[in-house]
Image (cartoon, rainbow, N blue to C red):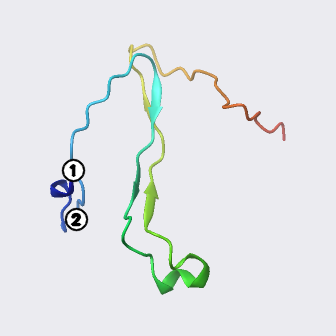
Amino acid sequence: MPDRFTNDVVKFDANLPLELKKDTHVIVATIQEEGRVGRVMGTQWGNMPPTAVSNPIFVDVDGGGFKANGDLLDVPLPLK
């Protein structure tokens, strides 16, 4: 998939098919495995690879409004 990356303003542009059976959210994550963020991030983080994570994209599959599934991933929400 390297041919989908460019040096233009838009770095990656592709349609990626997803088969969704019910309302869900999608998060996009990326990493430059061979790069490093560099000294601007200091000694602790400078040797880490550049990464990015999107905000969730909420998808209403059935047109009835997005409905979260309520799965807390075994981590209860804080009460305060």
| Image quadrant containing the C terminus | top right
Residue found at x 76% / y 35%: 77
> Farthest residue in the right direction?
80
| Dot label at residue 13 | 1
Quarter where residue 42 is shown? bottom right
Tell me where residue 28 appears, x and y as whole percent: 41, 46
Tell me which amino acid carries mark 2.
Answer: Val
Quarter where residue 22 is shown? top left
Tell me which amino acid carries mark 1.
Answer: Asp
Residue found at x 45% / y 42%: 27
Along the viewing direction, whichever of 49 and 65 lies nearer the viewer: 49
Q: Is residue 57 above or below residue 43?
A: above
Residue found at x 18% / y 63%: 6
Q: Is residue 42 above or below residue 21?
A: below
> Farthest residue in the left direction?
3
Tell me where residue 38 appears, x and y as whole percent: 45, 82
| Dot label at residue 9 | 2
Along the viewing direction, whichever of 17 and 47 lies nearer the viewer: 47
